[in-house]
Image (cartoon, helix red, strand yellow):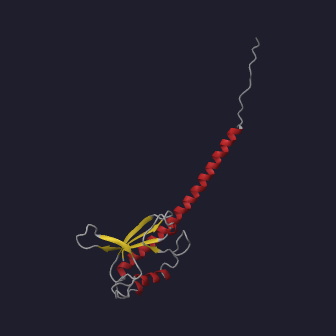
Amino acid sequence: MNPTKSSEHPGTAPTFSDWIFILIVIGALALVAYLGEIAFEHAQQTEKSKRNGEALAAWFSDASSKRFAPDYAIKACAGGGDPKTSTWGACLEHLQAHEFKDMTNPFKGKPPEFIEQCNPADKSLTGEIVLLKAVPTPAGSAVPSINSKLNPEDSIDQKLSLSIGICDKGSYLVKVADVEF
């Protein structure tokens, strides 16, 4: 008997199968990084849209305490005037021309529109602003108020309770604030 031992060691270099596995892992990591970047971009756009709604809410809150003064500077948005001439449409035109002229919808790169509701089936609504007025229901109703769209012909001569929201990337509503105007 010859006591020779085999001194061969199994191969430590990666095999063809190992290289395939490594390439698949690298590809998966690259795909996850790419999709993460896209999700981050959409989140940033949604956050910028939310800041638009917050700026609008802050302006409404600030104007609410001042707009009934006789010397209020923005006549189109002043309260206590003639209900037929003191309308939301005139106020909105002034706001879009002055205070919010630089406001843009980050999803589209143009000024945001004021809409009645977000609809996940309609992806064209991303980044738009939902502006609703709370209309009180008759005394004794189970629901104290209902929300409806603030139309251009609606009078703003009295205080209004407004609800502000935005549509996110999936056109779902993101509530921003409830304010008085």
Q: Quadrant of the N terminus?
A: top right
Q: In the orientation shown, which residue stands out farthest toward the left?
A: 140
Picture layout, residue 51 above or below residue 40: below
Residue 39: image quadrant is bottom right
Picture layout, residue 37 above or below residue 9: below
Report whether 14 appears left or right of 119: right
Q: Can you see residue 35?
A: yes
Residue 109: image quadrant is bottom right
Q: Nearer the viewer, residue 153 or 127?
A: 153
Where does the image place residue 89, in percent across and percent down from the top left?
Answer: 43, 82
Report whether 178 appears left or right of 94: left
Where does the image place residue 50, in percent across and percent down from the top left?
Answer: 47, 67
Q: In the orientation shown, which residue stands out farthest toward the front?
A: 121
Determine the residue positioned at 29% across, 73% down.
136
Q: Nearer the viewer, residue 25 or 116?
A: 116
Q: Can you see residue 73?
A: no
Q: Quadrant of the C terminus?
A: bottom left
Please tell me how many numbered marks the rendered image carries: 0
Determine the residue positioned at 71% across, 39% down.
16
Q: Nearer the viewer, residue 140 or 134?
A: 140
Where does the image place residue 58, in percent across and percent down from the top left?
Answer: 42, 73
Where does the image place residue 3, in percent across and percent down from the top left?
Answer: 75, 14
